[in-house]
Image (cartoon, rainbow, N blue to C red):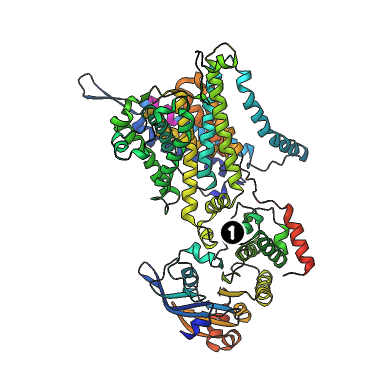
């Protein structure tokens, strides 16, 4: 468990299932402070399940999730979030009838913090995504897909997270927008030392961005290593790049 | 049904005509099946209890024919009018509407304050105004649960009933459990000693009891959403009504409770005697005083409901309600505790229902389970939906339209419901999001720009 001691997030032997279908079959994963870690894999490999099980849905059947040395395996979702693990969920899940300003405010509401800290987070988010600044009074549902993704990430950042989980941030977005969003993640990591776990089907982008990557197949981690190194491996190129470009 | 793709733009009239005819035939067939037993055959119990029946195929044929012709007429009208919603109003007209919209709420409030002055001599209208205000308050209370938190509650009348019965029982006989008082004398507050203050002390008590029942309902339905939640809340409303109906010892069952204490002007009774309110302020006694007082009382209660709702919407709890309505999963991921958020919505909504119930009891002086049927829940829900879920002004307008409209069409006798249903269908076609579908934002941006500007200047981030 020496690795777990230095990790911000350590997952050990995690198993989770939907009814009888086992989605995670004993997963180990480490994220060190200040790292960007990419989790790649095909549809249905269990990537999103892993991310969601950090928030307790589905609940782990075996294994442990340690955050900063503390076992959070059995915590309810809202308490996990209050430890400053923020999530930009799959499909973005912004609040469509609420304004952009309200969406961002929601990100800060449940976690403790002073007004000054909130104002600072808001300023940070708006500097990172100037598009949101122009749309503050607009309803979330009227934004474009890319803007909604920015809003989802911005909302997650409002709680000043120690760990940011991003589930498929490039899903359904134009390549140019994807680039902008990945650039913003890199900026956050460099300037704010934000630790990021990014789940992606777009292996090329994700592995270029990440310090380290994990490859998931059928509920198991099959490979791991530095992002660029993984990107060079022929089996990865074959499975997720040449053949998987359509994703 | 025929392919919808061909419908709006169907170019050739012949194909269009075939389509119209086909649709009319299908509608007529559906009507035939539906009405065959309902109208085609009439049954009745004979003199010695045997079943007698006769057929009414003539009426059946005329109804099916009416559906056939009606379907054609509607379809032709649709084509003639063209696609709905393409009309763009000129800017000046829209600006005028916006000004009207801003002035509407203050104008309504001033009108409400003046109602007892204007209609002082029209007892019927005063009574109606009190009734309308009661439904405005119920609508605003339910709006917290349905409009803001998005929890479809079909049993809201249960809390109205809990409030009414709490007030009636406690005001009449103190705590309803003599045994309980004997065992725990230190908790026994003898409400009979309250005298003229009974209403004012018991009003908050009734609200709190209703809120308690809101939480009790909330717990089992925490995991339910949408249709499932609606069914359970519907059942809850019925359970409360049936318990009241059958617990004869406590509630008097179907006979109800009469002689419920009337409200006082903060301790001063509205009676003709020496100590009455009229003698106190030196005017001749009139029974209208009580009506005027009741009107201002319910107006004040309703405005409190409105004010609390508006305040709560701007606090994290109110924002959490609305966010929960939009997306529960996202809320959890943002650290919102869904359990407390849901329970608080149920409790606060129920509390206002309880206040309204206590008011209803003191106004009527008599309550029975008949006043708390499912129809009331449906009516209040219709007010909220018709008003535009979440819009305070819309709910008030809908309550006025619904309850006022009900009285307006009284002359139509048995056709009243028919007219009413028709108007509702038309309204929902015309304004599917309710009278006022616009949602007012709750986070404002005055401070934000300067803060961000100053931080940017300092080179933060």
Residue B59 in the image: state x and y as whole percent: 39, 25
Residue B245 in the image: state x and y as whole percent: 32, 31
**Residue B76 visible to the viewer:** no
Tell me how many marks there are: 1
Q: Residue furthest top?
A: B284
Report the predominant secondary structure element of the magenta stretch.
helix
Q: Residue at x 46, y 20 (%)?
A: B413
Q: For this view, does B88 lie left or right of residue B22?
A: right
Label 1 Cα neighbours within 10 Å, binned few <14 / some 14-19 / many ≥20: many
In the depicted view, which residue is nearer to us: B395 or B32?
A: B395
Please report, as a chain letter, where disc 1 is located: A
The image quadrant that residue A103 belongs to is bottom right
Q: For this view, does B324 lie left or right of residue A181?
A: left
Q: Reply above or below: A134 against B239.
A: below
Q: Residue at x 60, y 18 (%)?
A: B119
Q: Secondary structure at mark 1?
A: loop
Residue A18 in the image: state x and y as whole percent: 39, 67
């Amino acid at each position: 468990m020496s690795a777990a001691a230095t990790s911000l997030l350590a997952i050990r032997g995690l198993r989770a299932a939907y009814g009888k279908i086992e989605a995670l079959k004993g997963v180990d994963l480490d994220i060190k402070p200040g790292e960007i870690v990419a989790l790649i894999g095909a549809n249905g490999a269990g990537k999103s399940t892993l991310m969601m099980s950090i928030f307790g849905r589905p609940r782990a059947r075996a294994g442990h999730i340690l955050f900063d040395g503390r076992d959070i395996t059995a915590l309810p979702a809202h308490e996990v979030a209050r430890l400053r693990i923020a999530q930009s969920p799959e499909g973005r899940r912004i609040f469509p009838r609420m304004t952009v300003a309200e969406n961002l405010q929601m990100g800060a509401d449940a976690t403790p913090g002073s007004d000054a800290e909130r104002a600072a987070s808001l300023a940070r988010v708006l500097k990172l995504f100037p598009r949101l600044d122009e749309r503050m009074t607009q309803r979330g549902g009227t934004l474009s897909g890319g803007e909604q993704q920015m809003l989802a990430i911005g909302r997650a950042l409002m709680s000043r997270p120690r760990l940011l989980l991003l589930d498929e941030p490039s899903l359904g977005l134009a390549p140019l927008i994807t680039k902008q969003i990945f650039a913003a993640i890199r900026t956050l990591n460099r300037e704010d030392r934000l630790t990021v776990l990014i789940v992606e089907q777009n292996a090329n982008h994700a592995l270029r961005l990440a310090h380290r990557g994990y490859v998931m197949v059928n509920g198991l981690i099959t490979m791991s290593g530095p992002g660029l190194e993984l990107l060079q491996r022929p089996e990865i190129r074959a499975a997720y790049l040449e053949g998987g470009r359509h994703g | 049904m025929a392919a919808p793709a061909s419908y709006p733009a169907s170019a050739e009239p012949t194909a269009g005509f075939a389509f119209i005819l086909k649709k009319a035939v299908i509608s007529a067939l559906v009507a035939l099946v539906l009405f065959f037993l309902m109208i085609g055959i009439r049954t009745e119990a004979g003199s010695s209890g045997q079943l007698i029946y006769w057929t009414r195929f003539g009426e059946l044929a005329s109804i099916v024919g009416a559906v056939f012709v009606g379907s054609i007429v509607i379809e032709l009208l649709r084509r003639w009018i063209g696609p709905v919603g393409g009309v763009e109003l000129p800017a000046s007209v829209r600006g005028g509407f916006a000004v009207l919209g801003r002035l509407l709420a203050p104008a309504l409030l001033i009108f409400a304050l003046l109602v007892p002055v204007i209609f002082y001599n029209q007892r019927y209208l005063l009574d109606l105004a009190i009734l309308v205000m009661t439904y405005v308050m119920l609508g605003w209370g339910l709006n917290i649960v349905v409009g803001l938190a998005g929890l479809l509650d079909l049993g809201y009348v249960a809390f109205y009933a809990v409030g009414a019965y709490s007030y009636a029982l406690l005001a009449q006989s103190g705590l309803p459990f003599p045994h309980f008082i004997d065992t725990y004398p230190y908790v026994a507050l003898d409400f009979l000693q309250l005298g003229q203050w009974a209403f004012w002390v018991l009003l908050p008590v009734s609200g709190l009891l209703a809120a308690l029942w809101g939480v009790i309902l909330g717990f089992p339905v925490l995991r339910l959403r949408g249709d499932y939640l609606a069914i359970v809340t519907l059942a809850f409303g019925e359970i409360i009504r049936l318990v009241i109906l059958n617990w004869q010892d406590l509630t008097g069952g179907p006979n109800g409770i009469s002689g419920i204490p009337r409200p006082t002007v903060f301790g001063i009774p509205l009676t003709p005697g020496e100590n009455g309110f009229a003698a106190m302020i030196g005017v001749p006694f009139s029974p209208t005083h009580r009506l005027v007082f009741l009107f201002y009382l319910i107006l004040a209660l309703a405005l409190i409901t409105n004010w609390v709702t508006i305040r709560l919407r701007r606090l994290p709890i109110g924002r959490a309600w609305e966010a929960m309505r939009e997306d529960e999963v996202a809320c959890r991921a943002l650290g919102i505790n869904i359990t407390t958020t849901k329970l608080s919505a149920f409790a606060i909504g129920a509390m206002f229902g309880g206040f309204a119930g206590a008011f209803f009891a003191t106004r009527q002086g008599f309550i029975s389970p008949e006043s708390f049927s499912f129809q009331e829940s449906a009516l209040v829900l219709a007010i909220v939906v018709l008003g535009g879920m979440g819009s305070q002004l819309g709910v008030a307008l809908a309550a006025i339209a619904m309850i006022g409209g009900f009285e307006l069409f009284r002359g139509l006798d048995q056709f009243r419901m028919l007219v009413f249903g028709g108007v509702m269908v038309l309204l929902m076609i015309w304004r599917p999001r309710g009278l006022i579908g616009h949602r007012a934002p709750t986070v404002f941006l005055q401070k934000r720009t300067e803060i961000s500007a100053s931080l940017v200047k300092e080179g933060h981030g």
